């Protein structure tokens, strides 16, 4: 009986495993100061090469700086 249960639940367990891994990657990317700093540098490079305008640059820079501030605040609270 347990073998049948395992066979029937295998797809669901696989989906749950993938969801957990995706969540781990998202959390890591959004809580890594180095990754945020790299994104800021890439954004600045795009702006300097006229790939984006100043308005778009300011908007995205504010988002990244807020994210960086949140990461640092969370680290201080731990």
Image: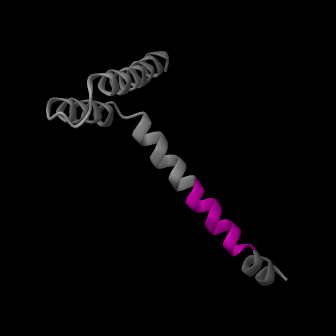
Q: Nearer the viewer, residue 59 or 36?
A: 59
Picture residue at 48% right of the left edge, 40% below the top: 27
State which quarter of the image contains the N terminus: bottom right
**For the view shown, which residue lies furthest in the left direction?**
49
Q: Which residues are magenta?
A: 9-19
Q: Is residue 11 above or below residue 30?
A: below
Picture residue at 18% right of the left edge, 33% below the top: 50
- State yes or no: residue 11 in magenta: yes
How many numbered markers are drawn?
A: 0
- Structure colour scheme: one colour
Q: Nearer the viewer, residue 6 or 58?
A: 58
Q: Is residue 39 above or below residue 74?
A: below
Residue 57's quadrant in the figure?
A: top left
**Left or right of 22 on screen, residue 13:** right
Q: Position of residue 55 (x, y in %)?
A: 33, 22
**For the view shown, which residue lies furthest in the right direction?**
1
Q: Is residue 11 above or below residue 28?
A: below
Picture residue at 67% right of the left edge, 73% below the top: 11
**Left or right of 4 on screen, residue 35:** left
**Left or right of 1 on screen, residue 73:** left
Q: Nearer the viewer, residue 14 or 45?
A: 45
Q: Position of residue 51 (x, y in %)?
A: 22, 37
Q: Position of residue 62 (x, y in %)?
A: 37, 20
The chief SS type of the magenta part is: helix
Residue 61's quadrant in the figure?
A: top left
């Amino acid at each position: 009986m347990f073998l049948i249960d395992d066979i029937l639940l295998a797809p669901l367990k696989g989906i749950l495993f993938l969801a957990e891994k995706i969540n781990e990657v998202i959390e890591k990317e959004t809580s890594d100061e180095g990754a945020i700093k790299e994104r800021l540098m890439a954004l600045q490079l795009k702006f300097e090469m006229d790939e984006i305008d100043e308005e778009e640059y300011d908007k995205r820079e504010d988002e990244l700086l807020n994210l960086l501030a949140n990461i640092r605040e969370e680290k201080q609270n731990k």
